[in-house]
Image: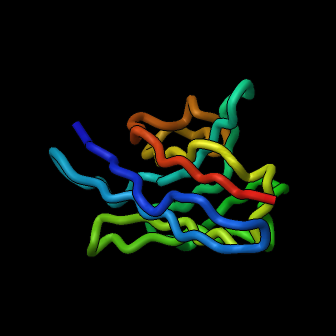
Amino acid sequence: QVQLVESGGGLVQAGGSLRLSCAASGRTFVGWNRMGWFRQAPGKEREFVAAISWSGGSTYYADFVKGRFTISRDNNKNTVYLQMNSLKPEDTAVYYCAQGDRPVVRDGAGYNYWGQGTQVTVSS
């Protein structure tokens, strides 16, 4: 089993920034697995935000965050990050970290393990 714990969420004004962290622990941090971030707003379905390959050499973003969010990882620290800039009220959601090795990047079906989520609230 792999445990994923997100942190860094909070309340921020529109235009502000937050950095989310996801610390992995457990049986092993399988560094060769892809890490991703998803989010779910009240009354909406979970949606893909960003993902990063095991080496960090490949990154993937949803169109609505391109140019504003940056995903990165530090395998030495077993941690993946999501730097979120120019936040908008519509970014308000619970953000989930996930780890997976299935060949589906932008869908939750591609991920094996999930964190509990961290709330991000952006006020207008």
Q: Indicate how the structure is coloured in the image.
A: rainbow
Q: Nearer the viewer, residue 119 or 111?
A: 119
Q: Is residue 76 left or right of residue 82?
A: left
Instruction: Give residue 15's quadrant in the image.
Output: bottom right
Q: Which residue is drawn at 58% across and 70% down?
A: 18
Q: From the viewer's perspective, is residue 74 above or below residue 46?
A: below
Quadrant of the snapshot with the C terminus: bottom right
Q: Name which residue lies at 53% across and 70% down.
A: 19
Residue 120: % across, % down: 59, 53
Task: Specify whether 100 is left or right of 30.
Answer: right
Q: Where is residue 80 in the image (x, y as percent from the top left)?
A: 43, 64
Name the residue: 65% across, 44% down: 93
Residue 2, percent across and down?
A: 26, 42
Quadrant containing the N terminus is: top left
* Front residue (pair 46, 110): 46
Residue at image x 43%, y 63%?
21
Q: Could you tell whether 83 is left or right of 55 in the image?
A: right
Marks counted in the figure total 0
- Left/right of residue 50 with respect to residue 23 in the rendered view: right
- Percent x, y for residue 113? 39, 37
Of 25 and 117, which appears nearest the observer? 117
Quadrant in which residue 89 is drawn: bottom right
> Which picture quadrant has residue 77?
bottom left
Outermost residue, left side:
27
Seen from the viewer's position, the closer of residues 16 and 115 is 16
